[in-house]
Image (cartoon, coloured by chain):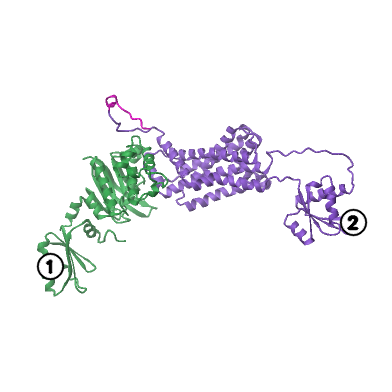
Chain colours: A green, B purple
């Protein structure tokens, strides 16, 4: 599969001090939906804006569809569609006028009406942008990116602040674009979004990629695919070694008294866990088991939760 | 815009799959959208079109040339006050004097407030005493006229005959001076705000950044913004001059093309200045402070409401070099005196320099993100 987006040793330093991106490498293949997942301030937006040619990197190389921003800026702009994290489109234009305006910048745009229908904005075509709901505005932002019939779509936090239904609608739109052969790069700090939507992910923290792969691979790399969480009555939480030595346990984490075990086979670990609790004459206050998620991957890699800070 | 490029083999296709945009499609759409947005903003319509007309109306009425014939005077009531009234009524020019008879405090109060230009009081020796204010031209004039009338009524004869021809023509009144000045000021305000404010607003909303993320030509965008100013300029010039002609019987001597061309050069020049002022500001607040700073000296010095010639000779070169002075002077010369475009080339050069240098600097410093 041809590589569509590639960057090597990307660095961006603001005012000579703050390192927003430090040595980031990515390779995104044609037809992929690739996600940059990370907490706020991890450098996701800086990275995507460098890839979009809107920011100059301090150092490093970027190629999009085999071309660089320096040599083929205008050609690249014809081939990519962008939705920024926060753009307030003109409130006193109608939805159709807005899409027509953006379409007018491209040599061979799609029909505005066709784009609006595809994004379920057909009924709102003559409404002023100022009257749209949050979800409709976000779909319009994506419509302005799709009207140029791009081959690559860049979306910076496309669903932040949207209600669950609007988020699902956007996911469907992104999947539909992918079905036509398009490549998508998006940033998000939502685990479920990354897990359901992205073919591959890079987890970004402090301006670096700390893990990369498909969601399933990343979770598998944790060792266990399941998480057993429990807490003991009183402020007891036992010694980590006790839990580590239980059968099938890959790793142990303690979050303020809530102990999480990464396990491969819960049906073997849980009876042993109950025995061990009995032996310490402690009492279980809470016990659950669930599938491991990307959140667990992030916590394991950084020691922090994604939505902290 | 929607003409599809089809190869002959595809000519029978039901619907062209692709539409091709021409070179100027982006420019036309930006211009179109700018004008639509302005039209949908009632405040903008008022400030750009309504306000200057209201200002012209208000100032035109306040400073209208009053018919000079009625002179209001107060006569202090006393034994000889009725005598004075009848003498004034008898006198040849007496019909232009309006005399009220009142007690002294009321007469003096009226005089202080400017209701009367002169107070007449018997001096108890068979004559009259005039109270007037030498600093008030109307008061000085009233004293001379009333004295003339009283003396004539008392029998004074002119020593030799004189005659006079009345001559009061449109073109030399305050409103004639004011309207071109208002027009110049309005072109400046609208260009600075219309371009500067719009740009900073779009930058703040990240819309500029969104635009440069498309293949849009940046020069087309700025060109479209300037062009929207030119379209509005046409309306502004037409409205304000039309209003002057209809409401104040203003006479426009210059050719409409000369006036419009001067207006266009002014609008584009201030558009460049607006672009420069807004080239880096991230917030409306900082931009509007800067814009007021740029415009304030011109409101005062450039001869909008009164002639800039009133300032000391020392600062005249500075005043003449301001773009609004050049625009106002050129508009006045053309509108009021019918001056040709060539005779205004010096002033036009000043505007072109301001606009051109601002534009060049703005291009170097302009921040799209």
- A210 or A193, which is in the foreground? A193
Q: Is residue B159 left or right of residue B240?
A: right
Position of residue B284 measured from the top left corner of the image (x, y, whole percent): 47, 51
Question: Which residue is the extreme one toward the top?
Answer: B8
Q: Secondary structure at mark 1?
A: helix
Position of residue A196 measured from the top left corner of the image (x, y, whole percent): 22, 51
- B344 or B151, which is in the foreground? B151
Quickly name the residue at label 2: B126
Residue B8 covered by magenta stretch: yes
Position of residue B298 measured from the top left corner of the image (x, y, whole percent): 59, 47
Mark 1 surroundings within 10 Å by alpha-carbon count, few (fewer than 14), some (14 through 19), many (20 or more): some
Mark nearest the camera among 1 and 2 is 2
- B292 or A135, which is in the foreground? A135
The answer to whether the residue labelled 1 contacts the one labelled 2, judged by CB atoms less than 8 Å apart, is no
- B200 or A95, which is in the foreground? A95
Q: Quadrant of residue A308?
A: bottom left
Q: Is residue A302 left or right of residue B355?
A: left
Which range is magenta? B1-12
- Is A20 above or below relative to A246? above
* C-alpha span from label 1 to label 2: 130 Å
Quickly name the residue at label 1: A273
Mark 1, chain letter? A
Task: Please tell me whether the stretch drawn in magenta is mainly helix, strand or loop.
Answer: loop
Q: Are marks 1 and 2 on the same chain?
A: no
Q: Quadrant of residue A19?
A: bottom left
Q: How many marks?
A: 2
Residue B276 appears in the figure:
no
Position of residue B131 measured from the top left corner of the image (x, y, whole percent): 80, 56
């Amino acid at each position: 599969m041809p590589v569509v987006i590639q960057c090597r040793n990307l660095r961006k330093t603001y005012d000579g001090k703050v390192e927003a991106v430090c040595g980031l490498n990515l390779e995104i293949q044609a037809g992929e939906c690739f996600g940059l997942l990370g907490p706020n301030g991890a450098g996701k937006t800086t990275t995507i804006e460098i890839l979009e040619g809107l920011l100059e990197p301090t150092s490093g190389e970027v190629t999009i569809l085999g071309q660089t921003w320096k040599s083929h800026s205008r050609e690249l702009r014809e081939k990519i569609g962008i939705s920024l994290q926060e753009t307030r489109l003109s409130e006193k234009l109608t939805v159709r006028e807005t899409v027509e305006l953006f379409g007018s910048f491209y040599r061979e745009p799609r029909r505005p009406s066709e784009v609006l229908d595809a994004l379920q904005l057909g009924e709102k075509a003559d409404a002023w942008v100022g009257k749209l709901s949050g979800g409709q505005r976000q779909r319009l932002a994506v419509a302005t990116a799709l009207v140029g019939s791009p081959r690559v779509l860049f979306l910076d936090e496309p669903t932040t602040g949207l209600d669950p239904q609007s988020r699902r609608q956007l996911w469907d739109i992104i999947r539909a674009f992918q079905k036509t052969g398009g490549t998508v790069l998006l940033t998000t700090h939502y685990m479920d979004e990354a897990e359901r939507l992205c073919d591959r992910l890079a987890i970004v923290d402090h301006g670096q990629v700390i893990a990369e792969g498909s969601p399933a691979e990343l979770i598998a790399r944790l060792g266990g695919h399941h998480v057993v969480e429990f807490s003991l009555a009183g402020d007891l939480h036992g010694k980590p070694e006790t839990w580590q030595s239980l059968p099938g346990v890959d790793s142990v984490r303690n979050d303020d008294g809530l102990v999480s075990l990464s396990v491969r086979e819960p049906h073997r670990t849980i009876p042993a866990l109950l025995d061990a609790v009995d032996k310490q004459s402690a009492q279980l206050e809470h016990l659950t088991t669930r599938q491991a998620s990307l959140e667990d991957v992030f916590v394991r890699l950084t020691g922090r939760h994604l939505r902290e800070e | 815009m929607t003409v599809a490029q089809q190869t002959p083999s595809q000519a029978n296709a039901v619907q062209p799959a692709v539409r091709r945009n021409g070179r100027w499609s982006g420019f036309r759409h930006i211009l179109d959208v700018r004008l639509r947005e302005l039209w949908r903003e009632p405040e903008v319509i008022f400030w750009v079109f309504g306000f200057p007309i209201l200002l012209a109306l208000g100032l035109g009425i306040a400073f209208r040339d009053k018919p000079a014939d009625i002179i209001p005077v107060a006569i202090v009531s006393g034994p000889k006050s009725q005598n004075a009234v009848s003498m004034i009524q008898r006198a040849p020019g007496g019909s232009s004097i309006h005399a009220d008879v009142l007690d002294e405090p009321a007469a003096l109060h009226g005089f202080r407030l400017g209701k009367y230009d002169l107070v007449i009081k018997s001096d108890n020796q068979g004559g009259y005493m005039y109270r007037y204010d030498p600093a008030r031209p109307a008061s000085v004039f009233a004293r001379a006229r009333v004295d003339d009338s009283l003396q004539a009524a008392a029998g004074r004869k002119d020593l030799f005959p004189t005659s006079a021809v009345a001559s009061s023509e449109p073109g030399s009144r305050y409103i004639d001076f004011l309207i071109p000045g208002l027009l110049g000021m309005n072109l400046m305000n609208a260009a600075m705000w219309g371009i500067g404010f719009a740009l900073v607003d779009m930058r703040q909303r990240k819309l500029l950044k969104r635009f440069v993320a498309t293949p849009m030509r940046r020069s087309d965008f700025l060109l479209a913004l300037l062009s929207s100013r030119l379209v509005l300029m046409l309306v502004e010039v037409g409205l304000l001059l039309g209003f002057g002609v209809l409401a104040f019987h203003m006479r426009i001597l210059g050719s409409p093309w000369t006036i419009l061309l001067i207006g266009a050069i002014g609008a584009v020049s201030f558009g460049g200045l607006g672009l420069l002022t807004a080239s880096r500001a991230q917030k409306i607040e900082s931009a509007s402070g800067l814009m007021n700073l740029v415009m304030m000296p011109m409101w005062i010095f450039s001869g909008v409401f009164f002639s800039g010639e009133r300032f000391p000779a020392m600062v005249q070169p500075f005043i003449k070099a301001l773009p609004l002075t050049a625009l106002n002077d050129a508009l006045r010369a053309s509108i009021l005196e019918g001056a040709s475009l060539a005779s205004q080339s010096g002033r036009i050069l000043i505007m072109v320099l301001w606009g051109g240098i601002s534009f060049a600097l703005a291009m170097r410093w302009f921040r799209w993100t």
